[in-house]
Structure formats: C-alpha cells, structure tokens
Amino acid sequence: MVYFIAKRLVQSLFVMLAVAFLAFSLFRFVGDPITQMTGVETSVEDQERLRDELGLNDPFAYQFARFTGDMLQGDFGFSYRTRQPVAEMIATRIPATLELGVVALLISLFVGIPAGVYTALRPRGAATQAILMMTLVGVSIPTFVIGIILIFFFGVQLGWLPTFGRGGTVNLGGWDTSFLTVDGWRAIILPAITLGVYQLTLTMRLVRAEMMDVMQSDYIRFATARGVPMGRLYFKHALANTMVPVITIIGLQFGGVIAFSIVTESVFQWPGMGLLFLESIRFVDIPVMGVYLVVIAFFFVLVNLIVDLLYVAIDPRLRIRDVS
Amino acid sequence: MLKVDHLTVKFPSRFGDVTAVENMSMHIGPGEIHGLVGESGAGKSTVGAAIIGLLQSPGFVSDGTMTLGETDLRSIDRFEAHALRGKRISMIFQDPQTSLNPLMRIEDQLIETILAHEDMPTSAAQKRAVDLLEEMGIEGASARMQSYPHQFSGGMRQRVVIALALCTNPELIIADEPTTALDVAVQSQVLELIRRLADVRKVSFMLITHDIGVIAQIADTVTVMRRGKLIENGPTARVLGHPEHDYTKQLMAAVPPLDRKIARFQVPDEDGPATAGKSKGDAAEAWLLGGKKPVPVGLTLDAINVAFPGVRTSFWQKPKPFVALSDISFDVTAGSVTGIVGESGSGKSTLAKTLTGLIKPESGTMTLGGSDLPGGKARSRHHPSRQLIQMVFQDPFSSLNSRHKIGAILAEPLWLYGLVEDKEERRALCADMLALVGMAPEAIDKYPHQFSGGQRQRIAVARALLARPKVLICDEPTSALDVSIQAQLLNLLKDLQSAFGLTVIFISHNLSVVRQMADDVVVLRHGRIQETGPSERVYQSPQADYTQRLLALTPTMPSDWR
C-alpha cells in the first residue's frame, strides 16, 4: 500500500521533470530570448552583455538545473508582454479555470452517471434511444458552436443568463471565487455546460457500457436470485463495480477539461488560464507558455494520483492481500 | 414441493420461436436431491432459470405448470417473483470466484440478504449469519465475516455462496454446476455439505451438472435431458444403473471409469455421416508416415525448476519468487502416453509451457530423443523441436483464430516449417487431414465459429499433426467438452497415437480420463512430483498419500452399474 503510493509519487516526479524539460526547451530554443527582449537599437555588445548576465552562455545542463530550481522555489520568471511575474499572472487566473472545470465536471457526473445507469437498465426504451441520440449530437458539434448556440438562446433571446465574464466574484484570501454570489453562479452556468457536454457524453456512455456488462455478471445474477432489493442491486452492487474504469476515464478527462478549456474560455471571455494562454501565444510570450505547460501537467499528474488513490478506496482487492 | 409439468420454454428469434425446453416434467420432494444431467445445450440451466424466474431475455415460458408448495410460479407478477427469490427458492452458481460481489464484505452481503426477506433487527441478522457460516464449516466466523470475498479460497468461497443461498431458509436451492470449478478435495467437501443440508434441514436441491460421477454420488433422483427434452427420470440407481433409454445407455458408456482402463469407448455414431463413403484420409496418413515405419522419440526432464517473480510490495524486501515447479525429473518413453495429473495450481500447464519453450526454467535440463532441448528464449524460433513438439490446448474456442478459414489455419504449419511448398498440394493435404480426424473435407472453406467445440478440437489436433510432430502435448484437451464428445476425441487421440508412433503428454485434472489414456502417470502437487509410475500400478496401488486421497475423493459410480 505505502509502496504503491510511493511508487506512483516517484513516477509522477519523472513526468514533471520531463514536462519541465519540454517547457525549458521551449523557452530556450524557440526563438532567441535576447532578440525578443531587446529592440533593434540595442548594440551587439549590449546584447552579449545581457546574454552573459542572464546566464544564457552557461552549459545547457546548468541552465536546466537553474530553471528547475527556480521553479521549485516558486520563481517562474517574468512575462515578456506585461513584465509582471508569471507566478502572479497564473495565480490570478487559476481560480477561474479551476472553478469552471469543477462545475463542468460536477454537471457531467450528476447528469452522466444517472443517465448512464438508466440507459443501461432500459436498453430498448424510447427515452434511452432519445438520450443516446441527443448526446451523440452533443459530441458531434464542436464546443464553440455549442457555446454560441447557448449564448444565442439563453443570453440573447431569453436574456436569462450573462454571456461573458465571471459576474460577481468574492476574494477569499487571494482566491477569486464566483461561488458566493448569485451573479457568479449565473455567469458560470453556460460556460460550464459548454465545457461539460463532451465529458458528460463520455461518462454516460462509459457508465452504460460498464453497467450493462456488470449486470450480466455472476454476482449480480446471484444477488438477483437471492432477492436483493432492486434499488440496492442497481446502485450498491452494480454501480460500485462499474466505477473503477469510469473514474479512470473521468480523471483523464478532467485533466483535459482544465487543459483544453481554452475554446470555451475564449467564447465566453472567461478570464482563466486558457484565455491567458491564447493571449500569450499571440504575443509569443514564451515564459508564460512554458509555465502554463508545467502547471497543466501538474494538474494531470495530481488528478491521476487521486484516481489511483480512489481505486484503492473503492476496490478492497487492492487494499487487502488475498489468500493464496 | 416443486412440481413441474409439461414445461415448455421458447426463445423468439427472427426465424420463429426456438424451443429450448419441451414438455419437461419433474417433481422434487422435501430434502430430496434431484440431479439434472445432460450435455451442453440440453436445456438444463434453462429449466433452472425458468423455475426461479430468471430466464434470459427474450426467453419465455410458453406452456406447462410450475408450482412450489401451493404457489403457482407462473401466475405471480414480477414483484412477487422477486420477493420469492431468496425467500423460497435460491440458487448456487458454478464459479465461486465470480458469484460474490468483490467490493462488499461477506457480512454485508449476508445481512443484506436476510434483511431483504425478514423483518428483524440487524443484530439478529448478524447472529444468524455467524451461526450459518459456522454451520457451513467456516471457523471463527464472526471475525472471518469481516473479510472480502477475495480473502477466501475457492472452496471457502463456495461455502459462503451456499450460506448466502441458505440464509433465508429457502425450500428449494437450484445448484447450477456447483462443483465444476472446484478441485476434487473441495468438491467432495461441498457435496458432503449439500447432502447434509438436504438430510438435516430438509432443503430440496436441484443439482444441475454434466458430471455423472457427482450425480451418482449424491443425487436421490435424476432426470436425463437431451436437446430440451426429457429422456428419462426416476431414482438415480435405477436410471443410471439400469438405463432404459438408448441415450442414457450411450451417455453411461461414454463416461470414463476410474477403476479400470477400457481400450475404446463405445460411441454409436462415431464416424458419423460426415465421412461415410468418402476418403478416410489415406493420403494424409501416407504423407505423415512418409512411406516409413514411424520412429518414436522420447523425452527426458532432469531437475527442472521454474519460478516466477513475486509482486513487489515494499522497498526493502526483495519480492519472494513464486516457485511453480521444483525439481521435476521424469522420462517419457518413446511412443508412449504420459499422463500428468494434479489439482489447479499444481504446475501442470507450466510444465507444458516449459516443454514447448514458452517459459525458461531456472535450472535443469530437457532432452528430446537424446539431443539437448534449450528452454525459453534460448530455444531459437528455427530450432527443430519447435516443429517436433506440438500442442493441443484446452479451450477450442480461443485456440483457433476466428478470422482465418480452417484451410488457412491448417496450412500454417505446412508453410511455416517448409514442409509443402505448393499451395494446391497444401490444400489437398489439409482437406485429407480433416478426413483423417473424422471431419468433412469441405470444412476447409469454413470459419471456426461454424463448428462445435468437439469439431474444433479435432481441427486443433489436425493442425498439430500437420507439423509432422514426434511429441504431442495435450493440455486438458477434453475438459471443455461433453462426455460423449470427449469419448470420441479420446478414441481419435488413441488411434492417431498408435498409427503415427506419437509420444503424447496428456495433462488433465480428471483422473478417470488420464487412466484411459496414459501408459505412465506423473502426479503433481504444488509444483512437486508426488508419484510417478506405470499408470496401472499407480491407479491400483497408489504409494503417495496424496495420490491415494485424490483417488478416494474422485466421485465414481458403483461398479455394478454397467
């Protein structure tokens, strides 16, 4: 058990190191940082002096070690575009993206799992066919089109919900949250649905497939044969057994949601990391791009570590050694 | 008690209704163990499912009556039926490994079932659960109950399953192949338990099985089914001891006896209409012999050790390797059949894999006909033994590539080993080889799924023979087959073995089958040899305690039954 977690931690460390290396290579080799920092009027001597001061003439390994060391100490460097520390910029953007991602995830779980169970238990029902068709349409349309359709109906035609920005936010110790105001909640609904539709469909179809599989298993047949009440049979026996593959995919997808919320954020002008990333690309703001890469990778690694721990929590076979 | 009269079960399909069970009648009294025997596809399990109301969709009961006590099982609605399940009728499934929910403690599963049917405080349900587990022979039940299913061994798990089926005091338990997945020692304990429950608690059992030895040992009455129809029923000793119907007689003749070796099984339609009046595979036989008298080749194993790396669970401790085979030495005489018997986990299949070069032994030497036989990857892909040693696997459904035609499957060894270069010649030879193993040569253009298990196993044998092997390793070749099909395949293997002078290693957990086939026997347990010797000697006067116990525990029929 301890060994299992320790092993995963070491693996995560290697993943982070690999990503840091990529980010560093981006920083170091995509274009010349000096030319980007200086104008045409800077003399060659000044450029060389700057290069030396910034340590760009040091050996490669030494530079990478310094880069990683700085990162570990929370020093992410400065943005080319705004001259602000990158750490500060990212920190102000993380809450928006995380909250959006979490709400999208919750929507996909609270709709996707029950819908998956329902469609598995009544595979031939009319409602099942309707749900399956609708969600297929949902994933077939690109995310930005869904966003625009939602904006058109709920924002423009009906005027129920705001179409851009975060609405009212409350600052809680450096974390801007939209969860504490009605406006904040109103603003998050449309982007969260837009972002969650794809994951919802995936969750639903996966739960459905796993559930149909589990319902055929011997232990469900045996539980049915001894008259275990249907509610417990479906939700305690069957659903729990579908969860291991489902959380794997949800975990992987959640990392994706955080990383690829770029489209949704730009459609809804959501001031999150995705939007920051887009702006950085436009201005070739390489330090921000590099740090974005590292932060996103960190989320992926973290979520997958949590998923691994959830396996252990769900499945006693991983917790307790069997007899043999 | 349970009365079933004129039961008919149908499955609607695009081509009209398929009748799975037709005009089936049986009566089971209190405390009676009623055996239901028949080969696969006979509709045994369908009868059980119809009684408990769990027919696979879209099957339905189209005719007949089923009553349990005063209750008409056909007239109740699905809610009443569900309330009745567990309360009055319960079920035991074949595989204890898969019939318990792996994520729930034994205790929770027991209490949940009791509370589903009886209004009582949880503490009372818990107490009953403990008592029941103790009665099933699980020691320290109140502590053991906190465990998850994977913490129990196979036999213990089946006891838990029986406790679960019994915990609401049902009148009838339908046991669908309850011991098929168990080793003989565990099987005999479970059967003893079932017998005791029937005698003491007066629970009725419907025991569905294909194993006639099991029925002979514990069933009071028996029903023989074939293709959904009732063949005959009555007291076990009468039906199986003095069968009236031809089918029952054939079935009994196909059961391999443990107490003696018979030269050939009596199989009525062995060479069936498929091959009648056609080629018997003379060309294939001539090709295999190559115009000479076959020269058999022997095999020697000396001090073979095989270990697998253990699972690492800590940084500091080196994982303990799992020893699969230790110090295995025996000789296989050229042209003889050596049987290898043992319970699951005894290393039988590991031995087969070691011989075929799929696993590298830690130490020890193997020789084939005097020349050294390297193990594992040290045996190159072009090593002559790759051709000389061929294998027939247990599961005929997964051992043939389902996307290849039979012709392509059979031709593979011919081009792989460069035995026949011409394509047309290969095809003719394959077709003739099919005839030799008792199949229609036309099968060459079909796909594996178009054949039954027994036919596929014949194809697997044909494929092995087309490599012109000297040694044939059969790993449980008949365990997935019905007895009559098994009898045919065993006859075929015997014929081929003597015709081509093959050296055969025949692996099986079934002692009776091995006795029919083997000249010598090796008894394995936990990767160690318990006993070796000529099979007649081993079976008649076993030396090792383990062999004696295995023989004593194997269910057999009284010898005066045939």
Image (cartoon, rainbow, N blue to C red):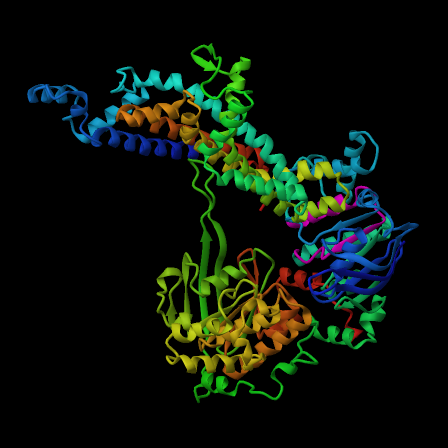
Whether B179 is among the magenta residues is yes
Number of callouts in the render? 0
Between B288 and B61, the one lying in front of the other is B61
- Say if B512 sits above or below A114 in the image: below
Q: In the picture provided, is B122 more to the left or to the right than B533?
A: right
Q: Position of residue B334 (x, y in %)?
A: 48, 77
Q: Residue furthest right?
A: B70
Q: Is residue B395 left or right of residue A24?
A: right
Left or right, A142 with respect to A69, comes to right
Please state the horizontal and vertical placement of residue B110, each as a whole percent of the image: 74, 38
Residue B428 drawn at (x, y percent): 47, 82
Q: Residue at x 81, y 72 (%)?
A: B241
**Vertically, is B20 above or below A153?**
below
> Where's residue A96, x and y in %?
44, 20
A176, A188: nearer the viewer: A188
Image-based side of B358 in relation to B8, left or right: left
Against B411, residue A217 (above or below) is: above
- Magenta residues span B154-182
